[in-house]
Image: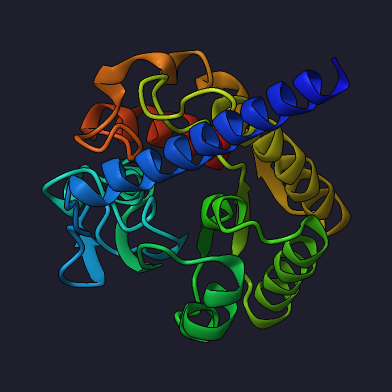
Amino acid sequence: MKKKITIISIALFIILTAYLAAAHYYIYKKISGAGLKSPDTMGEYIIRNEKNNEANIIYTALGDSLAAGVGVLRYEESYPYRIAQKISGAGGNITLRDRAYPGAKTSDLINDLLTAAINDRPDIVTLLIGVNDIHGNVSKTKFSENYKEILTRLKDGTKAKIFAVSIPYLGTNTLLLPPYNLYIKLRTIEYNKIIKELARENNIEYVDLYAPTELMFKDSSLYSADLFHPSAKGYELWAEIIYADINK
């Protein structure tokens, strides 16, 4: 009897391990198979307000593929560009600088993007980073250390109004199969707690993008072809939420 139970246990373990490996492989095969590219071809964009063209606000968008607009064909459909348009309509000419690239983690942002962002001498910074840290199994301790360094250097090196944006809910149910959907959800909630606490400690505005969009982003129309990056409709929704905090 014990031998039979052992054999069954081993068989179940093998089946479960194979399923988890297959589910994990499927996620990244689907994302990479869509072949989506960053639509950002310029890095800098000028949005003019003809009624108030004297003011010139510099807005730097820091992040990964989400800030780079992966999922749409034109960068003008990305959330940073749409935020810039909204700011311009209320305040004047905007110089938008995109400091982001697909796959970037917090460590990449520190090494490759942060100095340029500081040198932009921005008036406004939106920081949306962490999705790749979660999927890349970066520890919470290391993520916290990196995120703290980013906020500290931005505070010390600029006079910008900084907005720390929470990691959003991403991925349709047909992409994130159980148990990865639950795993990613729990990890996202944990990392967002870190972001919120660091924002509070540094007196920086925390923008909750996760809570108001979690249920909405069950809708596949808010996703692009890879079922992970937002569509133009999804990015517009994000832009409205983030801008509402900027415009307080």
Quarter of image, res 235: top left
Q: Give the tally of numbered discs.
A: 0
Quarter of image, res 184: top right
Residue shown at 59% from the left, 79% from the top: 110
Q: Is 47 left, or right, of 202 in this rendering?
A: left
Q: Nearer the viewer, residue 232 or 16?
A: 16
**Residue 209 visible in this rendered orientation of the protein:** no
**Residue 214 visible in this rendered orientation of the protein:** yes
Where is residue 10 drawn, in percent x and y?
70, 32
Q: Is 199 left, or right, of 212 in this rendering?
A: right
Where is residue 214 drawn, in percent x and y?
53, 20
Farthest-out residue, left: 73
Where is residue 182 drawn, in percent x and y?
63, 25
Residue shown at 78% from the left, 56% from the top: 140
Where is residue 26 drawn, in percent x and y?
36, 39
Against 108, residue 208 (above or below) is above
